[in-house]
Image: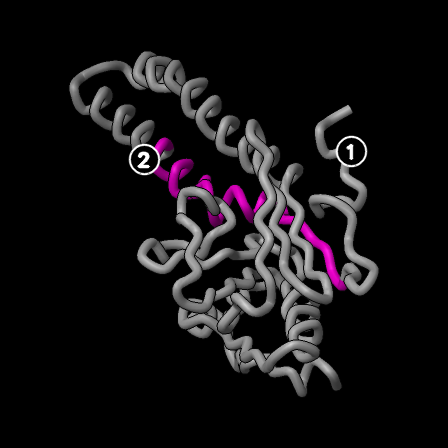
Amino acid sequence: MSEHDFEAIRGVPGELPANEKVIWQGAPDAWELAVSAFHIRPVAAYFAGMLALRLVTSVSGGQAVGAALMQTLSVLPLAIAALAMLGGLAWLYARTTVYTITSKRVVVRFGVALPKAINIPFAQIESASVKRLSKGRGDVALKLTSPNKIAFLQLWPNARPWSFSSPEPTFRALKDVEPAAASLVAAMREVAAIDVAPTRSAQARTSGASPVRPEAAAA
């Protein structure tokens, strides 16, 4: 039994008021989180480069190929352990994170050692942006109205990358980003207008990306 087993509604702290309901729930994909937040691919490339350099240096220094290869492979367990640690952390964060959109707010529940939940009323959301990746994957970042602000480290990894000065709570590494974006727009249409547009990085990586607007979500 975990601390989350006591939640009345998964991912939501406490009972919902009678006039509030859950619209959408989701969670990060573990592998996509490992790639985007924990940068497992660059780390793997770094270890591969270091091992290759070690092998070439040993051979060019006069060491026999077999001996140099065995010496190089002796470092391999360290690389595997580092990658396994990153993958394990990504899996733990994905397993303990729940993104929720209700008819009144957005809730981000996350945390491995110290679970926490952040409630963001719709009134505090100025706009949202969608980072669309291949195969329907992506992120949904929320820009908060001034002076509302949540510390980047308090949000991580559920924060838009590199947005340190104005941290944006983010649904990270979603396997299917469109339902989340459409649900957010549809829910907020009942409260206030919202524009959900693709981020610059997403536009660079996808073709024909277009803003998701309230009218499109309602269609």
> Which of the pair 89/159 is nearer the observer?
159
- Give the magenta part as a residue range: 23-47
In-image side of 37 versus 123 (left or right): left
- The amino acid type of the residue labelled 2 equals Gly
Q: Position of residue 164 (x, y in %)?
A: 33, 54
Q: Residue at x 33, y 27 (%)?
A: 51
- The answer for how far apart the CA atoms under marks 1 and 2 are is 47 Å
Is residue 84 covered in magenta? no
| Helix, strand or loop status at disc 2 | helix
Whether residue 210 is visible here, answered yes or no, is: yes
- The amino acid type of the residue labelled 1 equals Phe
Q: Residue at x 52, y 57 (%)?
A: 170
In-image side of 60 versus 73 (left or right): left
97 relative to 68, above or below: below
Q: Quadrant of residue 31?
A: top right
Give the residue number, with chain letter if any, for mark 1. Answer: 6
In-image side of 88 versus 10 (left or right): left
Q: Position of residue 160 (x, y in %)?
A: 44, 56
Q: Residue at x 78, y 57 (%)?
A: 17
Q: Which comes before the other along the chain, label 1 or label 2?
A: 1
Give the residue number, with chain letter if any, for mark 2. Answer: 49
In-image side of 120 versus 156 (left or right): right
Q: Position of residue 210 (x, y in %)?
A: 54, 82
